[in-house]
Amino acid sequence: MAKDRQEYNGFVSYSEESLLRKIWSVGIGRFFLLVLASIIITLINVMISWNDARTFLIILGIEILITFVAGWVYFFFKLNN
């Protein structure tokens, strides 16, 4: 019995898919993960800008531009394949 517990550590895996992929595959899960990511990014921006609105907006604008460009690049690569 101790050997079984040592081998499985008390966890049983029902699939090889990761938890984030399972959450992402559900519609409300995508919304939840996107909201969570945007909250985390906003808090990191506030920490970096030291609560200065001008710096915060500059960082946010750069992030939006990078996201926009990355989205278009992803779109074109997906379109070509």
Image: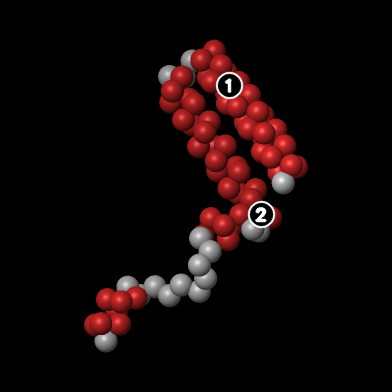
Q: Residue furthest right?
A: 79
For the residue marked with disc 2, what is the amino acid? Ile
Label 1, on which residue?
62
Crowding at dot 2, Cα within 10 Å, few <14 / some 14-19 / many 20+, comes out as few
Residue 44: horizontal and vertical position, in percent? 46, 30
Residue labelled with disc 2 = 28
Residue 34 or residue 21, whichever sits in front: 21
Residues under labels 2 and 1: Cα distance?
Answer: 28 Å
Q: Name the image colouring.
A: secondary structure
Quarter of the view holding residue 72: top right
* Residue at screen point 55% across, 41% down: 37
Tag shown at residue 35: none
Name the outermost residue toward the bottom: 1
Mark 2 touching mark 1, by CB under 8 A? no
Q: Is residue 29 above or below residue 11?
A: above
Q: Is residue 60 visible?
A: yes
